[in-house]
Amino acid sequence: MPLLRLLIIYVVAVVIVASGVIWAIFKFDLLPFENAASTEGPSSAIQPIALKEPGTAPKKARSAAQRPAAGRAAQFSTLPAHDLTGRRFETSPLPLSLPLDCQPGIDCWVFNFVDADPGKGRADFACGRMSYDTHKGTDIAVSDTGRLSEMIPVRAAAAGTVLGVRDGMEDINIKRIGRAAVKGKECGNGVRIDHGGGWHTQYCHMKRGSVSVKSGDLVRSGDRIGAVGLSGLTEFPHVHLTVEKNGKVVDPFVGLSGGDKCEIGRAPLWRRDVLEKLRYLSAIPYHVGFSDRLPKADEIRAGAFNANALSATSASLVFWAEIAGLRPDDAVSMRFFGPDGALLAEKAEKMTKHRIRIWWAIGKKSKNGWPPGAYRGEVTILRQTPAGPREARREARLDVF
């Protein structure tokens, strides 16, 4: 009997330990990741013409910011919210490196921050609205799904031990398959890392087949663990990074020590060099381009219209732009010019509410074709701030031949 009792106790202990390990490995699926409403729905406007919208198969292409096409980013500016000059921070208890192999503010951007509103609303640490209710991480995104073919590396933000992984989920916009299809697997293809001392990081929405680590692996800061993707509960290609201390979410821009309202914390987790690059930006004209017809938002976000040259026989010329981080009273304008400098189309509007992302397009039709040459589009956002008016803008060029 004593032997049988010991055997029963041993089996129960093994089951308990195994259950604990399984819980730890898949714990990241219990966190609410990527709300389908995070983009707030695209707001579109076409002036002065209405164009037909036939379907077009998305083409794989590099983003405008990445391609060396002449004039695509002749001018590109955003509105930084914080000047780090002279700021001294306390030592980070978990110095974090950049988790995505990209150039922040140039070809990748933070679209969603940790939700700082304890209630049912949404707020980011900088007193903006670039978040959504219960969002527990930082979303660093690229411009369009056309970039998924580049296998942009996702990297460990700090050294540690891989606690759990998932791979094999399809890269597909949640709008197409519905939330029920990823229930219990909202993180998509992901990796969870234990950094010791109660610290964990979690990386979500990676590309299928890209996860390059397994449970138990030791990783260093900067090691490749996967590639940016579109898996799980998400609408756009990005990496979602959650940071936890003893199971509690920590905003890496604020840290454990807190800080002044609307400001970076006294001890942010990001390394100083990363914080300099990954500054809070809003009014971001991050994705612009041209098409020969009125595109759909899904086509733009699939990278279907990243070409910078069109035929002179095109029935229409359209300039489009995606903008992130707009606030009430931001004055947004778009203008499209011909090779002789003549204004072909324009649109202007003042925002009435916070918008995480919108897309606009303006264009013109022609029955007789277009004069060859360099056409130019520009999008401008003017914001009134305590320090005076600030402007974000982007220009792009279209070669017509």
Image: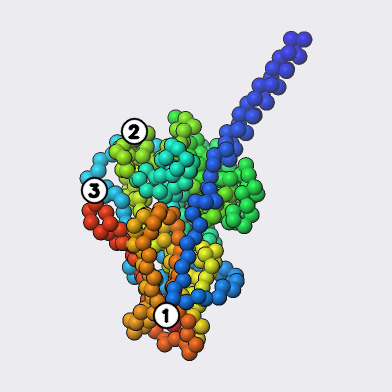
Q: Is residue 377 above or below residue 401?
A: above
Position of residue 69 in the picture relative to residue 10 (left or right): left
The residue shown at (31%, 43%) is 263
Q: Quadrant of residue 268?
A: top left
- Residue 359, position in %: x, y? 46, 64
Q: Which residue is mark 3?
A: 85
Say which amino acid is labelled 1. Asp
- Looking at marks 3 and 2 on the same chain, the residue that comes earlier in the sequence is marked by 3
- Single out the residue that lies furthest toward the front: 352
The residue shown at (36%, 62%) is 350
- Residue 187, position in %: x, y? 56, 45
Q: Element under label 2?
A: loop
- Looking at marks 1 and 3 on the same chain, the residue that comes earlier in the sequence is marked by 3
Along the viewing direction, whichever of 209 and 300 lies nearer the viewer: 300
- Looking at marks 2 and 1 on the same chain, the residue that comes earlier in the sequence is marked by 2
Q: Quadrant of the C terminus?
A: bottom left
Q: Which residue is mark 2?
A: 257
Say which amino acid is labelled 2. Ser
Position of residue 24 in the picture relative to residue 220 (left or right): right
Q: Element under label 3?
A: loop
Q: CA distance from mark 2 to mark 1?
A: 52 Å
Contact? badges 3 and 2 (CB < 8 Å): no
The residue shown at (51%, 39%) is 193
Question: Does residue 160 appear in this view?
Answer: no
Question: Does residue 123 appear in this view?
Answer: yes
Along the viewing direction, whichever of 1 and 236 lies nearer the viewer: 236
Q: CA distance from mark 1 to mark 3?
A: 40 Å
Q: Tag 3: Cα neighbours inside 10 Å, few (<14), some, or many (≥20)?
A: few
Q: Which residue is mark 1?
A: 399
- Single out the residue that lies furthest toward the bottom: 368
Q: Is residue 284 above or below residue 159?
A: below
